[in-house]
Image (tube, helix red, strand yellow):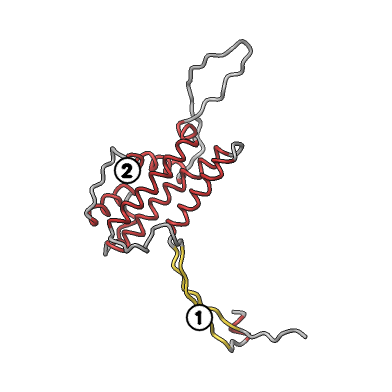
Amino acid sequence: MPKETRRVEIVTKKTIRTYAFLFHTARESLWHAEYDEKGRFFDCLSCITFCAFTLEAFFNHIGSQFIDHWARIERKLSPSDKLDLIADELGVSIKRDIVPFNDFKRLLWFRDYAAHGKTTTDEVIETHKLLPGERPPTGKTAWEKECTLDNARRYFESTRLMVEQLHQATGPDETDLPFLFPSSAGYHARENINDSKLNA
C-alpha cells in the first residue's frame, strides 16, 4: 500500500558566495589540466579566466561589506580601481611588483580578452629552425601563449593568495575561511498547501 504523502512548500533563503564558486571552477580546471594532456590548453584557458573572474567577484563581495556606497559605484569602477579602493578602506598596502599582486595586471588583460572576446585576424611572426621537409608550427597569439600549465598554476596560486590577504585584513575569526563554503542556506516548511498554491 503506497504511503500517504503530504503537500509541503519549502522556503529556502540562500547566500551565494559567487567568488568561491568561481575559484572552485578554476581549481577543477587546473586539476583537469594536470592530468589530461589532450584537453590541457582548454583547461588552462578556463582556469586562468576563472581566476580573473574570482578576483572581481571577491572585490564585489568585500566592497559590499565594507564600503557603504558600493552598490552605487561598483559598476563604474574597473577591477583595478576596486582593488585600490578596497585596499585603502582596509588599510592594506598593495605592492603590484611582488607576489602575489604582480600577476594582477596580467590577469586583468586576460580577463578582458575572454570577457570581451571578438573575432580577430592577427599576424604572428616567429623564427624557427626546421629540418628538410619538416612542417613549421602554427604561430600562436599572445593570449594563446598564456594558456600553459605553468601559467595556470601560477595564476591560480596568486589568486588564492590575493584573496586570502585581503580577507585576512577584514579581521575574520578563525572559522571564517574565504573558500570553505561557496554557499549557505536555511529553510523552513509550510504544510497544508492547497493545489493552486503548490502549482503556482
Disc ID at residue 45: none
Locate residue 159 relative to residue 129 in the image: left or right: left
Amino acid tagged 2: Phe
Relative to residue 188, is residue 118 depicted above or below?
A: above
Q: What's the distance in space between the residues labelled 1 and 2, CA to CA? A: 43 Å
Q: Which residue is at the front of the view, 28 or 125?
A: 28
Q: Which residue is at the front of the view, 37 or 63?
A: 37
Residue located 39% across and 58% down the image: 178
Local packing at callout 2 (Cα closer than 10 Å; few below 14, some 14-19, many 20+) is some
Q: Which residue is at the front of the view, 116 or 1?
A: 1
Residue 97 picture location, percent across and down? 28, 37
Q: Residue furthest top?
A: 132
Q: Which residue is mark 1?
A: 188
| Pointers 1 and 2 in contact (C-beta within 8 Å) | no
Q: Quadrant of the C terminus?
A: bottom right
Q: Which residue is mark 2?
A: 101
Relative to residue 155, is residue 15 depicted above or below?
A: below
Q: Quadrant of the N terminus?
A: bottom right
Looking at the rendering, which quadrant does residue 142 occupy?
top left
Residue located 47% across and 71% down the image: 185
Whether residue 145 is visible, yes or no, is yes
Looking at the rendering, which quadrant does residue 8 occupy?
bottom right
Residue 81 picture location, percent across and down? 29, 49
Instruction: Report the number of discs.
Output: 2
Residue 127 picture location, percent across and down? 48, 17
First in sequence: mark 1 or mark 2? 2
Relative to residue 139, is residue 63 depicted above or below?
A: below
Residue located 41% across and 47% down the image: 52
